[in-house]
């Protein structure tokens, strides 16, 4: 029964919540603290603080932590699954519709309009990362990291994960 309650406690906020992880945190709190009383408000706040300190989506981290505290590894799996399933179902439904109407002129026009928007969003993100790095690290460090990263990626074909780790190490040694 606890697994079913865990599933509902995370599925319902994720299916009715709109706006991503931070927007559904109050809905999850209403279930975990208010409805099922698995945690106090203080414990939930501590779990939220821990979740905010770690990388990845907040809702899945909260689900994993709460599920683990309530029912161990099985509870964590059920809670995370309940968090992911609504998005997965919506994506599958949307992809099914797009695939069914892939030859439609409207769908083709929509795709033509979406690509430039995504390109501009990625360009803006790149520029903001660059300007933040320039401001935080200075011109010399930014140019060194950028030049070495470009050389490693393009000339030596080093995996990007290793380049990110090397840049973090460089920042820790020279900028920390």
Image (cartoon, rainbow, N blue to C red):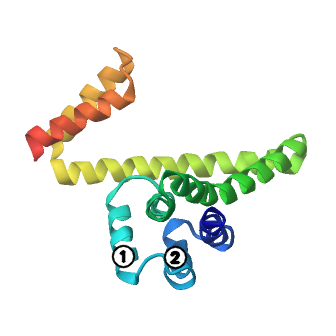
**112 or 11: which is nearer to us?**
11
Q: Is residue 111 above or below residue 3?
A: above
Tell which residue pokes out farthest to the top in this image. Answer: 156
Contact between labelled residues 1 and 2, with CB atoms less than 8 Å apart: no
As drawn, the label of residue 43 is 1
For disc 1, the neighbor class at 10 Å (few under 14, some 14 to 19, many from 20) is: few
**20 or 89: which is nearer to us?**
89
Residue tagged 2: 32
Residue sitting at x 38%, y 62%: 51
Residue 49 coordinates in the image, percent (x, y): 33, 69
- SS state under label 1: helix
Residue 33 coordinates in the image, percent (x, y): 49, 81
- SS state under label 2: helix
| Spatial separation of the CA atoms under disc 2 and disc 1 | 10 Å
Q: Quadrant of the N terminus?
A: bottom right
Residue sitting at x 66%, y 57%: 87
Residue sitting at x 86%, y 51%: 106
Task: Please state if 154 lies on the left or on the right of 139 as rendered.
Answer: right
Residue sitting at x 43%, y 51%: 125
Q: Which badge, 2 or 1, is on the more N-terminal residue?
A: 2
Task: Please state if 169 lies on the left or on the right of 60 as rendered.
Answer: left
């Amino acid at each position: 029964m606890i697994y079913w309650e865990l599933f509902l406690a995370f599925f319902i906020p994720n299916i009715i919540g709109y706006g991503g992880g931070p927007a559904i945190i109050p809905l999850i709190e209403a279930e975990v603290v208010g409805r099922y009383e698995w945690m106090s408000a203080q414990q939930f706040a501590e779990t939220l603080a821990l979740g905010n300190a770690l990388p990845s989506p907040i809702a899945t981290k909260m689900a994993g932590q709460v599920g683990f505290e309530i029912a161990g590894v099985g509870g964590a799996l059920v809670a995370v699954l309940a968090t992911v399933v609504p998005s997965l179902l919506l994506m599958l439904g949307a992809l099914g519709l797009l695939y069914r109407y892939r030859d439609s002129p409207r769908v083709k026009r929509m795709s033509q309009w979406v690509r430039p928007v995504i390109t501009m969003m990625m360009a803006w993100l790149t520029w903001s990362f660059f300007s933040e790095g320039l401001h935080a690290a200075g011109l010399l460090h930014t140019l060194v990291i950028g030049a070495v990263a470009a050389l490693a990626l393009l000339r030596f074909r080093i995996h990007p994960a290793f380049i990110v780790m090397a840049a973090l190490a460089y920042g820790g040694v020279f900028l920390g």
